[in-house]
Image: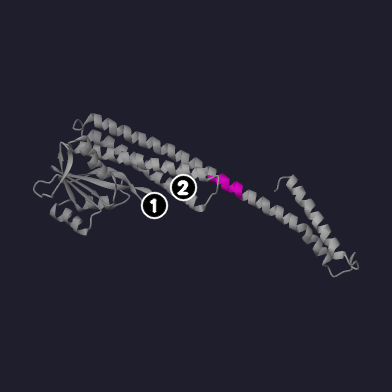
Amino acid sequence: MRNYKSTENGFIEHPVDADHPGWINVECPDEAEINELVDRMHVPQSFVNYVGDGDERPRVDHEGDWEITILRIPARGSGQDGPYITVPIGVIFHGDVIITLCFHPNDVIDYFIDYTRKRGIAVSNRPDFILHLVYSASFWYAKYLQIINNDVTQAGREMDRSVKNSDLLKLMRLQKTLVYFNTSLQGNEIMLERLERFYSGEYDTELLDDVGIELRQSIVTVQIYTEILESTMDTLGSVISNNVNSVMGRMTAVSIVLMVPTLIASFYGMNVDISLSSNPYAFVIIICISLLLTLFALIWLRHIKWF
């Protein structure tokens, strides 16, 4: 739990002061920090539960004098969730107090703080705080999307050499990530429209326009990368199918070639009287005939391009 004050040089960290709090950022809280929020600062328990729900959608809610705005921001994933996921972050307001609560580690908050310091931005009201936070989230959406696009491009290059199950699983996880991004960005865009109506005239209109442009660009980028990924997946499927057909064709050709000497050996292995049975060179003759017929079958299969 960290406390920050908004100054002309951006957000500066200060010791937690219960009497004069500024912006309190709570990331990956433990049980003690949650109890402090609920018991000492009187944050509604329902707000904490909302943010703790990984599937919570962007929205605004009120409880008494408390207000919460829930956004979805990008974060690094793990395991089967894909390399990147989206997680809810709650921006809680009560009087002059601002509390951000997120149950996942993320890069958005640190970038948000660094951005305000580099630009010397003093955030003076609620809507501008949310807009700057959404702007920072849009930056990381774009950054992660660029990494995803590079991974897809690399997978396309490696397609010519080999196609592995691990490559396909990686692309499937990237596809899942793009779905998460698209849904979350659209939810944030809808939330931005609601904030525009709710805080009519209180926000920085130029900042609102910039944030809206960033969100729309990110949404378009996600859609483009999704189409590229789907095209790559379709191509991979076609390559795999073509490889299977090629292997099956070669296996069939090998079976035909081996069938010729097997057939001759089967005839001469019967327990009946056959020609050449008394010839001392019968074995050599049969082997030579088998080799000649096998060579003929091989040449014929090469001619029809089965090999």
Which residue occupies 71% across, 52% down?
253
**Residue 70 appears in the picture as rendered:** no
Q: How is the image coloured?
A: one colour
Asked if residue 281 is among those painted magenta in the image, a careful observer would answer no
| Furthest residue in direction top, as rendered | 206
Which residue occupies 16% across, 43% down?
12
- Going from the N terminus, do you reach mark 1 or mark 2 first? 1
Residue 246 x %, y %? 64, 49
Residue 250 x %, y %? 67, 51
Asked if residue 241 is among those painted magenta in the image, a careful observer would answer yes
Which residue occupies 36% across, 43% down?
144
Residue 199 x %, y %? 20, 34
* Residue 290 position by quadrant: bottom right
Report the side of 140 relative to 119 (left or right): right
* In-front residue for pair 161/242: 161
Front label number (1 vs 2): 2
Three-letter code for the amino acid on which mark 1 is drawn: Asp
Asked if 11 appears above or below 266 in the picture, the reply is above
Callout 1: helix, strand or loop? helix
Callout 2: helix, strand or loop? helix
As measured in the structure, the alpha-carbon distance from the residue carrying label 1 to the one carrying label 2 is: 12 Å
| Furthest residue in direction bottom, as rendered | 271
**Residue with the mark numbered 1:** 81
Labels in figure, total: 2
**Residue with the mark numbered 2:** 171
State the predominant SS element of the stretch in magenta: helix
Report the side of 187 relative to 8 (left or right): right
Three-letter code for the amino acid on which mark 2 is drawn: Leu
Report the side of 269 relative to 24 (left or right): right
The magenta segment: 236-243
